[in-house]
Image: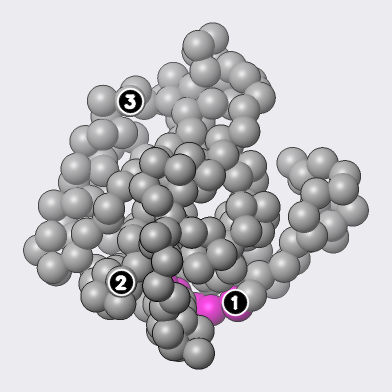
Amino acid sequence: MLTTTSLRPAVFLDRDGTLIEERGYLDRLDLLTLFPWTADALRLLTRAGFVTVVITNQSAIGRGVIDEPFLASVHAAIDAELALGGARIDRYYYCPHHPDAEVKAYRQVCRCRKPGAGMIEQACREMGLDPAQSVMVGDRWIDIRCGRAAGTRTVLVRTGHGGHEADNPPDDAASPNVAPGTVPMAADAILNNLMEAAGWILRASSR
């Protein structure tokens, strides 16, 4: 059962490969496709009292492939499709940075780019969320490390890159983009998709 504190529980969600089909750099709205279970899973989580927050790396901005207004239009299109299914995302956080970004303003090493925990930490501050009651769901091991670094539970889904990622767990000592001495890599659950993840989260929260 969800605990009663002044801070709220959340489900932090990777975007591409978790909520929507993986398209590489999504640079056209006609490439946007939600998984058929996405709206149902989000609706269940919202009804159970979870805040739903997207946490997404968007280095395509820094690379000059898309711009921030286009990204806003993608998220507006997602919201419109979810609304048709009675579901919603409460807020989107994205990181436009990359150390090798072509656009100078975005060329930096930052704390917000996953596997860093910066976006989750920002969401917790701004939205009054409790990471200890929360879960990060994604299709990459960087999503799992992000959640663990922020103090959430974690679920790896096999959609998007998740099938390959689940079958090829990285060795902590040789994991890419991970500094020595950081939080060990481990998911609390590895499941087929977001609907299964929602079921796992609801069962775990009722214990």
Q: Nearer the viewer, residue 133 or 83?
A: 133
Q: Amino acid at mark 2?
A: Gly
Do residues under tags 3 and 1 come within 8 Å of each other at their CB atoms? Answer: no
Q: Amino acid at mark 3?
A: Glu
- Above/below status of 53 relative to 5: above
Q: Earlier in the sequence, mark 3 or mark 2?
A: 2
- Above/below status of 198 relative to 115: below
Q: Earlier in the sequence, mark 3 or mark 1?
A: 3
Q: Is residue 62 left or right of residue 44?
A: right
Query: On the rendered image, what quadrant is the N terminus found in?
Result: bottom left
**Residue 199 in view:** yes
The residue sitting at 19% across, 65% down in the picture is 87
Q: Is residue 137 magenta?
A: no
Question: What label does residue 49 carry, if any?
Answer: 2
Q: Is residue 85 left or right of residue 195?
A: left
Quarter of the image for residue 161 reads: bottom right
Q: Is residue 190 magenta?
A: yes
- Gap between marks 3 and 2 measured at Cα: 30 Å
Quarter of the image for residue 125 reads: top left
The residue sitting at 52% across, 18% down in the picture is 106
Residue holding disc 1? 190
Q: Position of residue 177 (x, y in %)?
A: 74, 41
Residue holding disc 3? 68
- Gap between marks 3 and 1 measured at Cα: 32 Å
**Residue 37 in view:** no
Q: Nearer the viewer, residue 86 or 74?
A: 86
Crowdedness near tag 2: few (<14), some (14–19) or many (≥20) residues, C-alpha within 10 Å:
few
Q: Position of residue 7 (x, y in %)?
A: 42, 59
Q: Position of residue 57 (x, y in %)?
A: 50, 40
